[in-house]
Image: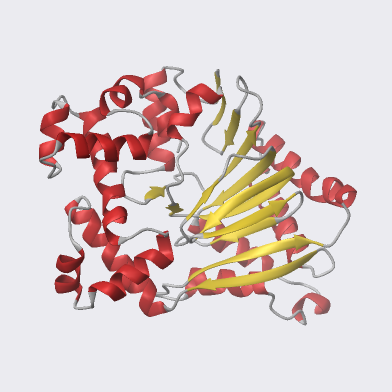
Amino acid sequence: MYLFHSLETTDLKTLKELLISNTRNDSIPALYQLKPPFQLYFLTVHPKDRENFYLTTAISPDSSIYLSQSKEEVMPYLTNSMHHHDYYELLFVLDGELYQNIENRRHLYTTGSCCLLNKKVLHTEEYSTDFRAVFLQLSDSFIHELHRNLSFNFFNVEKEHTSTFLEEFLIANLYESGNTTKNYIDFIPVQEHSWIIQNIHHIFELITMESLTPSIGSSSAIMELFCKLFRILNSGENYMTTPVQIGTDTENRIYDMITDAMLQTNGRISRRELAASLHYSGVYLNNIVKKYTGLTIYDYGMTFCMKKTAELLLSSELSISEIAASMGFSNRTHFYKIFQGTYHMSPSEYRKKNGLFSTLL
């Protein structure tokens, strides 16, 4: 089931193109993109309810979309592939508990807890637990304005305030040119659940109402609500903060170079070829890939290769044999085995079953 609001079209094909342009492109690992200044992405997962397994609502200044998917519709597309964003994302668990894999480390987020990720961090959510969560997706321009508002103080008590981890996070990731740090902040609630509902849930409700029924002054009202939310998260009386930095700057740069090489070759580059190209030992490069993805160089390359294969299945009229050959496979059985392991269906099934939901992941 799907519902639309504030859209000029309800045509499914046009909506599919809109969602692609707003939320992702075809690089590997998946890069999700955001065109509006902010978006609230509400996600509810009911693992034991086959008909209402995956419920999503996306609300932004541009549009609002509601989707309800059964387990049968969703499972072929729910892989454990990592993704990252061209925007900042604050995950907040409204109810239940959610496991998230961040740079190959598994984290449990319970009711009331949250996590702020910068744009470079690879991660993926798990769907084995029952939860409701909201993902606040914030663009560079929005974060810049938010930080400006947080720094605009009239009163001495505000001016004497010392920087928090959250403010330092924003400054480092927004203003430092060439910054390659992969980092995020975990927020663990100190207050009771009833306080969280009364204060934080209420903020989400107000932002949602302003976004769905905007009027003169709604932009300022929404910005103030976000400022209030961040002030609550900033307070040690409300949340304990744990800043986490992943890897060294050198490792981050090398990993980015490996990823660029994978993109340029559709993943069909060997460890020896990477070592010759980047002037590092193959063992060292493999260790970096393993650290950031949990995969070997070969398996990491196959994620790029299978992504390109899936793209060709949907965008070209080439036969499956022709696609396999273009991806460098001479063994048809081997090609089918890897594709099946990645997408849990054959290439022909993937081509037939592709639909709206595949554009949302």
Left or right of 154, for residue 28: left
Residue 289 in the image: state x and y as whole percent.
35, 65
Residue 192 in the image: state x and y as whole percent.
89, 54
- Name the residue rendered at 41%, 59% in the picture: 293
Q: In the rendered image, is residue 57 in sight?
A: yes
Pick the quarter of the image with the N terminus.
Answer: top right
Q: Is residue 204 above or below residue 232?
A: above
Q: Is residue 13 above or below residue 327?
A: above
- Name the residue rendered at 34%, 44% in the picture: 25
Q: In the rendered image, is residue 222 in sight?
A: no
- Name the residue rendered at 20%, 73% in the picture: 278
| Most foreground residue, 206 or 307 | 307
**Picture colour scheme:** secondary structure
Residue 174 in the image: state x and y as whole percent.
50, 68
Q: Number of numbered discs present? A: 0
Q: Identify the image quadrant of residue 315.
A: top left
| Most foreground residue, 65 or 277 | 277
Residue 5 in the image: state x and y as whole percent.
56, 24
Pick the quarter of the image with the C terminus.
Answer: top left
Q: Identify the image quadrant of residue 152.
A: bottom right
- Name the residue rendered at 44%, 45% in the picture: 35
Q: Is residue 322 above or below residue 288?
A: above
| Most foreground residue, 124 or 154 | 124
Q: Identify the image quadrant of residue 249.
A: bottom left
Q: Is residue 289 above or below residue 264?
A: below
